[in-house]
Each structure stands twice: as C-alpha cells, then as structure tokens.
Amino acid sequence: MARRCEICGKGTVAGHSVPRKGQPKKQGGAGQHIGVKSKRVFRPNIIKVKALVGTQKRTINVCTRCLRGGKVVKV
C-alpha cells in the first residue's frame, strides 16, 4: 500500500531520533547531552476507504486527518 494520502498528499518523512541524557539546567542539573542521532521515519496514518469520487465508488488511501476533517464522502 502506498503511504501517501490521495486527498492532501501527505507522505512519509525522514528524520532523526535524538537521545537526550542528563537533567536540564532549569531543573537543577548540569545540562542535557545529545547522544548519537539515528535515522527514523515518520509515517502518516493512512487507511483504505471506500469513498465517492465524483459519482463513482472507489477505494482510496486517505489519512485520518482528512477523514476527520470531512474531506471524504464515505460510501
């Protein structure tokens, strides 16, 4: 299944997982130290939904934000 919303175009985005060690200075510590960053992927919440596209019934991949926002008319 393609990880892209057919309504808004939201897809996967790459980023970093940043481990932070130590207590922050504002909480009385010596300050936080950043460890080794590792790659990670942010994936959207995509769901297959039967919806009306024009006058036809189609199965489309839609993110839950578009479903909740009322941008999709379900069959």
Image: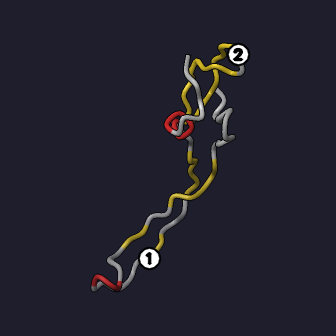
Query: Of callouts 1 and 2, which one flags the residue occurring earlier in the amino acid sequence?
Result: 1
| Image vertical order of residue 38 relative to residue 13, above or below | below
Element carrying mark 2: loop
Decide if residue 74 is on the left or right side of residue 10.
left
Q: Quadrant of residue 50?
A: top right
Q: Which residue is mark 2?
A: 55
Q: Residue at x 49, y 37 (%)?
A: 68
* Nearer to us in this view, 22 or 54: 54
Outermost residue, front side: 55
Q: Measuring from the top left, give residue 16's x and y in whole percent.
A: 56, 58
Residue 51 in the image: above or below residue 41:
above
Task: Measure how far apart labels 1 and 2 are at the Cα level.
Answer: 57 Å
Q: Check disc 1 and give the amino acid type.
A: His
- Residue 34 spot, x, y in % from top left: 47, 72
Front: mark 1 or 2: 2
Q: Residues within 10 Å of mark 1 (few under 14, many from 20)?
A: few
> Which one is in front, 48 or 30?
48
Which mark is on residue 33? 1
- Give me the disc on residue 54: none
Residue located 49% across and 63% down the image:
18
Q: Residue at x 35, y 79 (%)?
A: 24
48 vs 13: above or below: above
Question: What x and y, as percent, mark residue 67?
Answer: 53, 33
Quarter of the image with the C terminus is top right
| Residue 19 x, y percent position in the rendering | 45, 64
